[in-house]
Image (spheres, helix red, strand yellow):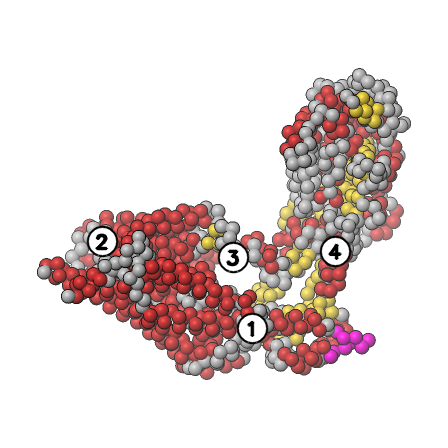
Amino acid sequence: MLDSVLKNDEKQDRNFKILIYIATVAIVFLALAGRLFYLQYIQYEENFQRSENNRMRRIVLTAERGSIFDRNEKVLVRNRPSYQIAVLPSELKNRDSVFQRLLRIKDSTGARIFDSASVDTAFQRSRWIKHGFLRILEDASPEQVSIIEERSADLPGVVTLVESRREYPYGTMAAHVFGYTGEVSEEQLDKEEFKNYSLGDRIGQKGLEKEYDHEFRGTDGVKFIEVNAFGREVGLIQGMGIQEAIPGYHMVTTLDLELQRVAEEALPDSVRGAIVALDPRTGEILAMVSSPRLDPNIFSLKRRERNKGWAEVALDSTRPLTNRAISGVYPPASVFKLITAGAGLENGFLSRHSYMPKPCTGGYQFGSRYQKCWGTHGRLDLVNAIRLSCDVYFYQAGLAIGMERINEFGERFGLGSILGVDIPGERGGWLPDSASFNARNKRNGWRWARGLILNLAIGQGQLVTPLQQAVMVGSMATGKGVYRPHFMKELRSFDGKVVRRYEPVKIHEGQMSAETHQILLDGMDSVVNHPGGTGRRAALPGIRVGGKSGSGEWKKGEKTHAWFVAVAPLEDPQIVVAVIQEAEGGGGAKSAPICRKIMEQYFFGSVEDEEKNKKEVLP
Amino acid sequence: MRGSGRFLDNTMKVDWFFLLLVLLLMSIGLTLVYSATATRETIWYQSLWFHQGIYFCAGCILAMFIALIKIDYWKKMAWPFYFMVIISLTFVALGGGDSAKGAGRWIDLGFIRIQPSEFAKIAYLLAISSWLSVHPVSLIRLKSLIVPGLIFIVPFLLVLKQPDLSTALVFTAVTLVGFYWAGLTLIDLFILLSPVFSVLLSYPQIPYSQILWGLLITAVFFVLIKYHYPKKLTILFLSLTIISGYASSMAWNSLEDHQRSRVMTFMDPMRDPQGEGYQVIQSKVAIGSGGLLGKGLGEGSQTNLAFLPEEHTDFIFSVLGEQFGFLGGFTALTLYFLFLWRGMSICRLHLDPFVNLVVAGACTIFLFHITVNISMTLGMMPVTGLPLPFLSYGGSFLLTCMMLVGLLVNMRYQGSQLENNYKN
């Protein structure tokens, strides 16, 4: 009984709460319905008129992409205007008749302006994409634009736009460094880092364009305009204001246009290879070539030609898309003997006057194996062994020193790991020792054997990039540490203010004793300047050039990869040049002359330069 | 008596009227998503309305499963769910989540991406209901509010950090209704919230805010005396109200200009007609131009709604208003009202406080979403990202809604034999 009374109380209390709750809901919903009624009945006329006349359009003002300049402020990459003919989905009426009319339009030569496939695609997409523009003709000629403008009354919803597209005035020159721009892909749009991008935006897809996309890009603006029934702009909407676009930053790079030009000429498309020239004191890259090349201008062309050009470079077996200077890994070949020599000196296994137990008789007997040398050099001290690049000397030195010590010395100069250059795609190479060799070859069952040291001591078996090779020799010559190689020198805002400057970054100490440093310099000197040196063709009158040749074996029966790395002047190194030509033969014969040409340009320039030196000055 | 299954209830009856309401709302939603996005040319199985349909079917199966589980089992599972959700919210808050689409709200399990804050709504509802059902609260015994306060504040702050203010406010609404059901009177709630009102009144855009603030203090004081609250409590809440008012206006003045303008734009989107205000203007014009009967299915979207980027998600009500006019909007409101009324009527059938709390909380989640979303499209409230139940496009939220529907269906008849005994 008592229980029942209690329950009755509880029930009443609960019903009251339910009542309050439902009453609250009712009040809230009545308020919403009232507002709905206000907008849809009392304000109906006004709102209806506004919707009928709603020809307000939100226009994104694309920011001008920053240009790229060389170190002397000559323009390397810029923008050009490009006319686009597009449809505006929200304005497109009488689709079928507009479609037919578009296809009938011909230019003065009688050719159709539009191809039915791209117009058809745009029209299909226009049914569900309601924002922005759908292009039906990219990169239209002025004639095509004027034809369309004349007939605009018959073509509601068809508009012409001016966009700015990237232009690479020197074509393939340094194409791998600049990269290219393309439309942002849908996969990219899904990612967090691209949240400020929208479909149709152009974005750097490789090289500097990609690495510094954010800096080049600037900030898009927006304006609200009123349009007439044909979709043409009538004027700005009052009170909505306009937010101007802020152009992206210009970049002054470390590249030297003239040096780059000489380097490009030295390595024709028929030769596969790479050239890197840099300043070892700061890491500034002066020139970088990878051959064969691609022309980044194809990515700014209209879709069909772009696809064709893309297919050509993508399917090419010589892989022109790869930047061999940073992504190509090669055996360092005899250039690595500098590392072996340095490791021996630092660890007390070698000195300036070290002679090996066995003189070079054209080969070396190791167990049951006979390892050849490329010549017959007799009894040599260290400097002369470097000069003549004697394999037998370094076989024995390597066996005594051991790979761990040699690799440790190599790592001091940036081998075996990426250097952090400011374009994407760099590879780090590989310095094998017993542990890493076994780990890497676990699957195919190869085991480390002491005999492998013979190959590794002369640089056959490691992997390095041309960039690493240049940085290694350069920092070894300066003896002042390894600086991160980079292209960015300065970023400037559109009004010319410097907004960021690249401060050189020391990434390795490159420590060695003064004695070691001097012996290595003498070795590099003798290679170029002493009789019989393998790099005589790199010699430059008036400048003391040092260097080291290499001939990388990569496949039995094929010509070797021709390496040469030169550095000058030896008293105070300012430039180091690394050249590799795939399967072209001996480094001293083939690549040393290229080094010489580049050094010559660097130190003496050429007369024609003076004429070309008309600066395209920054705004 | 009840079925013999260990946790499945096999004496289920189904509330067909309630399900009919869900089905009607859902079909309106699918129609609108279809008219806002689909076209003849899109392949049907790639279109958004079809995706939404798939999610609805999945939601139905989930709801059916949930409806079959015994209430006791939900009581038992409330805490494990709650702690699981707290852990995953913490994981997201510490930056472990995948931060697609702006804020970091997702956890990627490889095969499926989970948005823990969606599940948090349900887990929190079960947990707070489970606690309050055995520990009634009272303002006079302030201690009774400590544990439920903690249960509330942890997920609240974690979600706020994402940042997802609107979901955090969903928790708040559920908590307040829970407190009401578990013992606080309306007067208690007014006193409890008075510091919050005080903070809101310090916002300078409100006309006569100082006078209103004075009135608030007077009212709080009067109420505290009139209803004989203990002295300590009177002093505590009166000073809290005054201090929070001063503190917030000081905080407001110490904000940087751009921060202040961000808050003001949030409160009043019209201040930024190029950004959020743009959507609201377009939404109001779209709805208003629909008139009493609307422009008809598929009409109007070409001219007007082309300006609404979020038309099929957050602004779906604008599509409804433009295409079906006042008739359509009012119908949707009526269906929602019937839905909530039918849902709340479950409370009449049960004495079990747990069931009461879950039902009231679930209805509150729906109510909050409906009110905030529709007010936003009508230009009455800030633009938040809360979707409209059953109408907006979006898989995770639809699943949450269907799970709540499952819970409500579950609780209608299960265990209501109690009620029958009591009637006799």
Indicate the chain on which mark 4 is placed.
A
Q: Are marks 2 and 1 on the same chain?
A: yes
Q: Is residue A105 magenta?
A: yes
Q: Which residues are magenta?
A: A104-113
**Residue flagged by tag 3: what amino acid is it?**
Lys
The x, y position of residue A233, in whole percent, is 62, 75
Question: In the image, are marks 3 and 4 on the same chain?
Answer: no
Above or below — where is A201 with respect to B99? Answer: below
* Label 2 neighbour load within 10 Å: few <14, some 14-19, many 20+: some
Give x and y (percent) for residue B20: 36, 71
Label number found at residue B136: 2
Report the residue that reaches farthest toward the top.
A357
Residues at discs 1 and 4 both on one chain: no
Q: Is residue A20 above or below residue B176?
A: below
| Residue that badge 1 annotates | B39
Callouts 3 and 2 close, C-beta under 8 Å: no
Quadrant of the image occupied by residue B126? bottom left
**Which amino acid, mark 1?**
Thr
Mark 4 surroundings within 10 Å by alpha-carbon count, few (fewer than 14), some (14 through 19), many (20 or more): many
* Mark 1 vs 3, N-terminal side: 1
Q: How far is disc 4 from disc 2 in space, using C-alphas?
A: 72 Å
- Judged by depth in the image, the label closer to the viewer, 1 or 4, is 1
Circle 2 — which element? loop
